[in-house]
Image: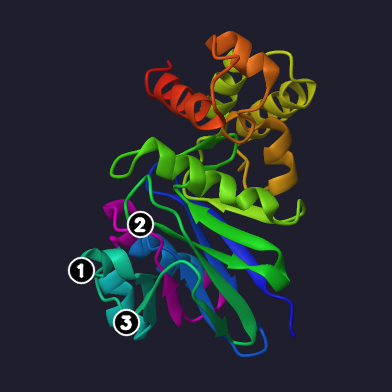
Amino acid sequence: MTALQFHQFICRSDNYAVLVHDPASGATVSIDAPDADAIINALDAKGWTLTDIFTTHHHGDHVEGNLALKQRFQCAITGPKAEAGKIPGIDRRLGGGDAFTWVGHDVRIFDCPGHTLGHIAYHMPDDTVLFAADTLFSLGCGRVFEGTMAEMHHSVNQFRDLPPETLLHCGHEYTQSNARFALSVEPGNAALQARAKEVDRLRVDGKMTCPTRIGDELETNPFLRCASAEIRRILNLAQASDEEVFAALRRAKDSFR
């Protein structure tokens, strides 16, 4: 099996776009389609032709480019079956537990309700990569717009069991602000302190902070660390359930400045 090639870039203001290319077949998939023009320019620069779009959820900044890209490349669009009516140009509808093969590479689907009710994530286990979009961010998680806190807690934490070397691709470049919040609820975490400094350095240099590793997130992301004694002490939730701590963290992040 040929190793995949990845090209990630920021478009719109802070959206991540990711192109995944299989050099053996020439196939290329865009993970979501935030900006058709930016994706076309990136494809032209790489000399790649778009064959697929893997859509994670229906928000406009993730599907805005679907129809323009489909018209230009006749690419196939895969998306969440629970949001099929909201995904422009959708051809294949999938949900949690579904799996398929993309040019010889296994792809498995996670249901991730919370940010939206039908949000899905794409996991490529043989390539040790997860495309979580707006469910799990580097040092954070997405806002709960349509689902419940309990659903989002489950959605985020289902990734805990993936191999720690799994690369996490997110939907947005939010790491610097997420780091500031994480430090406010777990200031004594030495791994978090070091990572926050590295994030600041990367951003000063104009570099991206993603992808990150699931193992690093387990050590530093407060939404994956609801059992932390320090987080519980700062939130005054020492005896609460992990789900209650998660909800308190998400509400605190919503108003954090």
Name the quadrant containing residue 78: bottom left
Quarter of the image that includes the N terminus:
bottom right
What is the three-letter code of the residue carrying label 3? Asp
Q: Is residue 104 above or below residue 197?
A: below
* Rendered position, 215 above or below 75: above
Percent of width and height locating residue 250 = 44, 28
Disc 1 packing (10 Å; few <14; some 14–19; many ≥20) = few
Q: Is residue 14 left or right of residue 88?
A: right
Answer yes or no: is residue 211 visible: no
For this rendering, which residue is in front, 3 or 133? Answer: 133
Task: Give the numbered dot on residue 91.
Answer: 3
Q: How is the image coloured?
A: rainbow
In front of the other: 240 or 7:
240
- Tell me the residue that label 2 is attached to: 62
Q: Which residue is mark 1?
A: 85
Secondary structure found at label 1: helix
At horizontal 68% and vertical 69% (from top left) the residue drawn is: 125
Q: Which residues are magenta?
A: 44-64
Sequence-first tag of 1 and 3: 1
Question: Residue 172, percent across and down?
Answer: 47, 44
Q: What type is the residue that disc 2 sits on?
A: His
Secondary element at image label 3: loop
Kindly indicate whether the residue at mark 2 contacts the one at mark 1 (C-beta within 8 angstroms).
Answer: no
Q: What's the distance in space between the residues labelled 1 and 3, CA to CA?
A: 11 Å
Left or right of 184, for residue 165: right
Question: Where's residue 41, x and y in %?
Answer: 44, 66
Dot 1 or dot 2: first in sequence order is 2
